[in-house]
Amino acid sequence: MSIDRLQSTFTNLSETTILMLKIGVLGAGHLGKIHIKCIKAIPEYELVGFYDPIPENAAAVSKEHGIPSFDTIEALLEVVDLVDIVTPTLSHFECAEKALQAGKHVFVEKPVTNTVAEAEQLMKLSAEQGLKMQVGHVERFNPAFVAAQPYLKQPMFIETHRLAQFNPRGLDVPVVLDLMIHDIDVILKAVGSEVEKISASGVNVVADTPDIANARLEFKNGCVANLTTSRIAVKNMRKSRFFQKDAYVAVDFLEKKSEIVRMQEATGDEGPFSMVLDLGEGKGKKEIIFENPKVHETNAIREELFTFHEAIVNDTEPIVTIRDGYNALKVAHGILDQIKANLKKIG
C-alpha cells in the first residue's frame, strides 16, 4: 500500500463495482462506538450488527446507530465475512480465536492480545486457516506519520513522549500496553531491526500496574530509542523525534504536524536568509533546510479499517499484520518484565 494511497483516502474512490464485505463489531464501548461510526462511513462494508455483553449498553447503541444487536458472538459470526474486535484486551484472544475457527477474517484492536503466547497462537491459527488479521496500531495511519515516512532513512536515535491526562478507562492494563505500545509499533516500523537490549523503569501511582514508564531500546543495527509515557500527566502530548544522518524528523501525532530539518551540501547560491554551517577547514559547508510536508487530513481509524478491506479483497498483506502486533507486544512485555524486576529491588 503506497503512501499516496493512504493520503488520498476516500477522495478518489474507484468508480468500479464495490465488492461489499459483511462485517460485525465485537464490543460497543467507547472505542467500539467510534468504530461503528467509521464502518458506517465506508461503502465497501455492510455493517450487519454488533455484539456487546451488557444488555443495557447493547440496546442503547442499537437504538442510537440503527443496527442490530446480536445475543451471542456465535450468532454474529454466522452472518459476517469478518469481525472488528473492540473488546477489553483480556478478551481479545477468546474473540479472535472464535472468529478464526469460524473462518472469519479478524481486525483486532491493539494490543493484539494480553499475552505473547496468545498472540503466537493467533498468528499460527490465522496462517493455518488462510485468513487475514490486522492489528489496530492506528498511529501507523496518523496523517502526520504518513507524511513523515518518506523522510525516514535509517534513524539511529529516537525519542518519544506520549503523555495523557488521567482517565479511569484503560486502567485494566499497564500504561505500557495501553499507550506506549503505540510508539513501540511505530519505532519497530521505522527502524526495521531487531531489539537487542531493553532497559526500563516505571512507577505505580494510581493503578496496581505502572502508570508512568520509561524504556530504552537498543537495536542490533545500533539504533537507540528512548520512550516515555504517562497516563497521569497535566496535559496530553504525543510527540516523536527521529535523528538520522543529515536529518531530523519530528512528528506530532496529537496536532498532526510533521517537520523535517535536513542538511545538504551548500552550493554557494544560497540566499541572504539561508542557514549555512561552516564545518571547518577542508570539510566544506552544509545548508540547513526546513520542510513541513503536507499532511492530508484523514480519519486514521476509518483508514485502517478500509485498508483491511483492500487486503482481503485483493489478497494482499495487511498494513499492520498479526506479526507486527506480536512483535510490538513482545517488546512491551520485555519492558514490563524490566519494570517489575526494578520494582522488586526497591521492595
Image: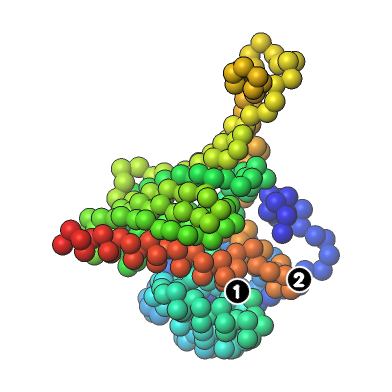
Q: Amino acid at mark 1?
A: Met
In the rendering, at what x and y percent does residue 222 appear?
A: 52, 50
Dot 1 or dot 2: first in sequence order is 1
Q: Residue at x 59, y 21 (%)?
A: 279
In this figure, which residue is indicated by the disc labeled 1? 133
Q: Is residue 253 visible?
A: no
**Quadrant assignment, res 131:** bottom right
Q: Which mark is residue 108?
A: none
Say few, some or many: other residues with alpha carbon within 10 Å of mark 1 (under 14 / 14 to 19 / 20 or more). Answer: many
In this figure, which residue is indicated by the disc labeled 2? 314
**Relative vertical location of residue 293 with respect to residue 95 in this rendering, above or below:** above
Q: Is residue 274 visible?
A: yes
Nearer to us in this view, 178 or 347: 347
Q: Amino acid at mark 2?
A: Asn
**Quadrant assignment, res 178:** bottom left
In the rendering, at what x and y percent does residue 15 appear?
A: 82, 61
The residue at the far front in this view is 282
Q: Residue at x 57, y 45 (%)?
A: 155
In the rendered image, the quadrant that contains the C terminus is bottom left
Nearer to us in this view, 47 or 192: 192
Nearer to us in this view, 169 or 317: 317
In the rendering, at what x and y percent does residue 68 appear?
A: 53, 78
In the rendering, at what x and y percent does residue 229 appear?
A: 37, 51
**Quadrant assignment, res 247:** top right
**Relative vertical location of residue 290 with respect to residue 40 in this rendering, above or below:** above
In the rendered image, the quadrant that contains the N terminus is bottom right
Using residue 203 as the reference point, say whether residue 191 is left or right of it: right
CA–CA distance between discs 1 and 2?
14 Å
